[in-house]
Amino acid sequence: MSRIRTKKEAKGQEGNRPGEELRVLISHARIQKKVAEMAREIRRDFPKDSLHLIGVLKGSIFFLADLARELGGEVSFDFLGVSSYGKGTDSTGEVKLTKDLDLSIEGLTVLVVEDILDTGLTLKYLLKSFEERKPKHLRVAVLLDKVERRIADVKADYTGFEIPNEFVVGYGLDYDERYRNLPDVCVLQLGTRGKT
Ligand code: IMP
């Protein structure tokens, strides 16, 4: 049964499980505004280029979709999948490609589109792999950046929001594959009852 939500609770909160509380960190309206700003900045840097966006599955899908439509001009995209290297404690930097790109990026102006930059290990691995494929330009756009969590020496060229070290879901980001469809970015708080 759905229940009335308070102003600060996330849209879609009705779908959460007992012990899982959501608090809106960045509203959908703020995300949309920021994505449009980022698109303008990227287009200013590459006014004439055909931009090839690479989305890292699955968290980046909404960000990529919105960014692609704001960019204007010629845009193409491709996706790749990476497996998680652990549950936050493992910092070995082991990243496994679960789905490679469909298309060659040689000679293209490539924009890697990531949902969130955390330790940076995934991005470091990806950039190394992409550089070997000889793109003309290689840039990175991330929506969220948990700066204080960084282990790898990597930086995004375009960043939406710097956020504190809290676990966030929504706008593509998941917890156990859930909450990706929330329009806002929300902090997920696990109560004493924890996961059910
Ligand atoms: P990194 O290699 O530690 O930078 O990890 C990046 C990936 O970890 C992201 O693409 C997300 O899939 C995942 N991740 C990191 N922080 C969060 C979070 O707060 N919520 C959901 N996924 C996260």
Image (spheres, rainbow, N blue to C red):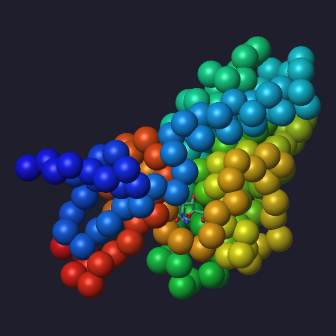
Vertical placement of residue 22 versus 105, above or below: below
Q: Work out which residue is located at the far top of the displayed protein and give it.
A: 73
Residue visible at 65% across and 34% down?
Answer: 33
Quarter-of-image position of residue 141 = top right
Residue visible at 73% across and 69% down?
Answer: 147
Q: Nearer the viewer, residue 95 or 187?
A: 187
Query: In this view of the protein, can residue 47 be seen by the observer?
Result: yes
Residue visible at 64% across and 55% down?
Answer: 144
Query: In this view of the protein, can residue 125 be seen by the observer?
Result: no
* Image location of residue 51, percent across then percent down: 77, 26
Q: Is residue 91 left or right of residue 52?
A: left
Count numbered badges in the picture.
0
Image quadrant where one finds the C terminus: bottom left
Vertical placement of residue 131 versus 154, above or below: above
Vertical placement of residue 136 versus 142, above or below: above
* Image location of residue 159, percent across then percent down: 75, 50
Residue visible at 39% across and 45% down?
Answer: 182
Q: Nearer the viewer, residue 86 or 21?
A: 21
Quarter-of-image position of residue 120 = bottom right
Q: Nearer the viewer, residue 10 or 51?
A: 10
Q: Is residue 162 left or right of residue 59?
A: right
* Image location of residue 155, percent across then percent down: 82, 60
Quarter-of-image position of residue 189 = bottom left
Q: Quadrant of ligand 1?
A: bottom right
Q: Work out which residue is located at the far front of the displayed protein and give it.
A: 7
* Image location of residue 36, percent across then percent down: 69, 30
Q: Work out which residue is located at the far left of the displayed protein and give it.
A: 1
